[in-house]
Amino acid sequence: MRVTYHEGSTPLHRLNPITKLVILLAFCLLAIFGPGLQVQGAGLVLSLLLLLSSGAAYAGIRGVRSLIFICLILFLIQALFVKTGRPLAGFEESFLGVNVRFVLTSGGLAAGARISMRLLTIIFSSLIFVITTDPARLAYSLMQAGVPYRYGFMLVLALRFIPVFQSEASTVRRAQVARGLRVDSAGPLGLLRLARYTFTPLLVSALSRVETISSSMDARGFGITGSRTYLRDSDFSILDWITSISAVALLFIGLVVTT
């Protein structure tokens, strides 16, 4: 399932996209540089609560369930193979003449919890940003904040064409299956066959669309002026200021005060 923007009227939806970028960066920095398990756990709980308040938490978590499963695998790997700290449990058995010894330590559990909570915090905060932020509004907010409108327009085009190319890829695969081609077989040969029969039609379609868009932009005089006007303004409200300052303050507290 693809993770995408979900329309809504929650407070997170009404925030300026730049504010949500600040929140995302604050959570990521806290997850990466957080000094202890308490800070990591607090960041994880707070990001999960914000995700639940977005109104589309189920769809977002369902779209990244494979990443959450990877976090669980990483926790188990760290818990099984890191032997630092105090031993908590273990056993030693002989299997086919080989002694198998397993010891679960406090350091292994702490290492597993630390890396899994870091990844989960980054995943949940990224979900908050993606499912509550309109891509077009994000681009317009960045342009009004000072990003050159040419780069903002490239961002809008890229975000607009992602679902178009996904739909075309699905259409190409269904057409190939209807013609009896096996493009979903496993192994390197299957990947090569998938690239040959899927990417080539998509590349031709992409080049055709690029040529059409570039001709349209030239006809409309795109890039002649150094500035542009906007149909809708993306203002930075008092709530955005309060939220951004609070996010930076919580990041400072988590990184500095708790050390």
Image (spheres, helix red, strand yellow):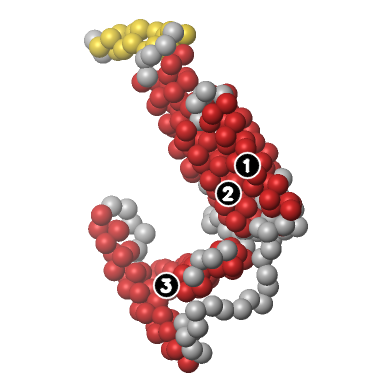
Task: Using the rendered view, name the quadrant where residue 40 is placed.
Answer: top right
**Residue that mark 2 sits on:** 22
Location of residue 143 with respect to 16 vertically, above or below = below
Residue 156: image location, x then y, percent = 52, 70
Label 2 SS: helix
Task: Using the rendered view, name the quadrant where residue 79 is placed.
Answer: top left
Question: Mark on residue 247?
Answer: 1
Examine the rendering and report whether any part of residue 49 can be seen: yes
Name which residue lies at 53% across and 46% down. Answer: 25
Residue type highlighted by circle 1: Ala
Q: Is residue 102 left or right of residue 196?
A: right
**Residue that mark 3 sits on:** 172
Q: Residues within 10 Å of mark 2 (few under 14, many from 20)?
A: some
Q: Is residue 180 left or right of residue 6?
A: left
Q: In the rendered structure, are the residues bearing label 1 and label 2 in contact, judged by CB atoms less than 8 Å apart?
A: yes
Mark before the other along the chain sequence, 2 or 3: 2
Q: Nearer the viewer, mark 2 or mark 3?
A: 2
Residue type highlighted by circle 2: Val
Examine the rendering and report whether any part of residue 178 can be seen: no
Residue type highlighted by circle 3: Val
